[in-house]
Amino acid sequence: MKPESAIQTGFAEVKHSQADGQSGAPHAGTALEVKDLRAGYAGREILKGISFSVAADDFFAIIGPSGAGKSTLIRCVNRLVEPTSGAVIINGRDILQVSQSELRGVRRNIGMIFQEFNLIERLSVIDNVLTGRLGYTGTVRSLFRMYTKDDIKHALMLLDRVGLSEHVDKRADRLSGGQRQRVGIARALIQNPKLLLVDEPTSSLDPKISREVMGLIKEIGLEFGIPILCNIHDVELACEFCTRVIGLQDGMKKFEGSPRELDKAALQDIYSMEVL
Amino acid sequence: MDARVAQVAVWRRRTRATRYTAYFAVAVAVAWSIEAIVIADTDWSRIFTGTLLQTLRGFVDLDFSILPALVQPTIETVLMATLATLAGLVLAIPVAWLGASNITPLGSFSYGIGRTLMTLSRSVHEIVWALIFVSAVGLGALAGVLAMAVRSVGFISKTIAEAIEDVDPKPIEAMRAVGGTKFQILLFGILPQITPVFIGNMIFEWDINIRRSTIMGLVGAGGLGLALFRQMAMSNYGGIATVVLVVLALIILAEIFSYYARRAVI
């Protein structure tokens, strides 16, 4: 477990370990298609028929006021929230139709980055990153945290990539907010995801760190060829980093277009909830 | 108006009568208790003929000659407490799993089973558990270990279950999102969060089990209690006092150890 050697040889190993998971077919056009998605809790409908599709090279932003359903929408894509109807098509397959046991296989191909990082505070940075491999790790191996050598090399390489090579053995609760989000990013990447879900990555961070984290997520999407679906309430950041934007209001899609098309009128339309 | 005054007067007379009846009943009960328990049941001849002072003097006259014979029971006491705490922990984990409302597998059915087991373990005294296990597995330390293990389950599983009910749901969400199994979610989403409570309470329970294991011997379940019982059987008052002092020293040491151990862990 020597970090230096792992970083030098890391890349070849990563290529190797990327072969596991689903068949490595190249992304063809659409990475994710959401059709007429509806979801609700306790009789209240939160998503009222949302449709959109994310291209393989998209950094796709969802904007909208608080309570518009952004968080619910993104959680429907990996079924952390169960939608009531509609379709979520990834790789030509409607993941709302898969069984609970298959769902695990679907989820391990979808990385997720959280608003409040959702790290395991008392574990070390590298152990947190390695939890991203749980979907590929058997129960007994995970009980003793016996990850493969390839996984450990991969984790060290990713920590190097997100700029945390100094902090590998520190406990997660000793890092700053920006550093913690970088651990979250590395944890998502070690899954070798075919899609990255990002839920308000910058809400717990200050403006300067927010810009750095958004930049890192964008770079990583391009570098590893992963399409990204990102909730973000900060319109300015969305326009600066994202390639496509939809605007939600009260569970309905109010806008879809490129950041350039998102003019004042469109914004007013999305954020007019207060008038209602 | 007059009718109402009369009514109040009747009512007051009646409540006064009830009150005095109650006083009288309490006084009778107290008098009867004193007569039955203290006056009739005490060997007054012993108290007034000077044997009382003689016996007390016997206790003060410590018998250090039995100290070498106490080394082995002392070690046995510590080992019994340690083993019982570990065994109690193993038994407490499934009970906590059943009795934590947020992760219990079969809803209120298994939750009820978990909570009942916790109450059962705690509501039966350790001496009673020891008597049960002595008759089950015979005299000796094993019966004491089993009794204390079963008695420990209640406290350990209750505190673990409460810690589980209090966990932060965010790491759990992350472990679901990476495709973890239910077991992996428990292992990584919940276990690291409850580790401090878990270890802290285990050390605390070990401390309590040291106390318990010093009396297990009184019912034949091994440890220092057995030495105490032997000295009592021989009416060696100095020996009894010596054993009690050793117990006291052991408990103080255990308390100091557990204080520093808990500080180091949390």
Image (tube, rainbow, N blue to C red):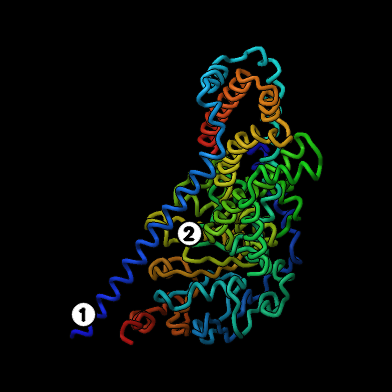
Residue B263 at x, y percent in the picture: 50, 35
Q: Is residue B60 visible?
A: yes
- Give the residue type at disc 1: Val
The chain holding disc 1 is B
Disc 1 is placed on an element classified as helix
Q: Which residue is mark 1?
A: B5
Q: Residues within 10 Å of mark 2 (few under 14, many from 20)?
A: some
Residue at the top extreme, as displayed: B65
- Give the residue type at disc 2: Glu
Q: Residue at x 54, y 61 (%)?
A: B169
On the same chain, marks 2 and 1? The answer is: no
Q: Is residue A190 visible?
A: no
Q: Nearest the camera: B104 or B63? A: B63
Q: Residue at x 56, y 72 (%)?
A: A75
- Between disc 2 and disc 1, the foreground one is 1
Is the residue under label 1 in contact with that under label 2 (CB below 8 Å)?
A: no
Q: Which residue is mark 2?
A: A116
Residue B64 at x, y percent in the picture: 62, 13
B213 in relation to A275, above or below? above
B165 in relation to B130, above or below? below
The chain holding disc 2 is A
Residue B245 at x, y percent in the picture: 57, 22
Q: Residue at x 53, y 84 (%)?
A: A50
Residue at the right extreme, as displayed: B137
The picture quadrant where one finds residue B55 is top right
A139 in relation to B223, above or below? below
Residue A100 at x, y percent in the picture: 71, 72
Name the mark on residue A254: none
Disc 2 is placed on an element classified as loop
Q: Nearest the camera: A47 or B227? A: B227
Q: Nearest the camera: B35 or B1? A: B35
Q: Quadrant location of the N terminus of chain B?
A: bottom left
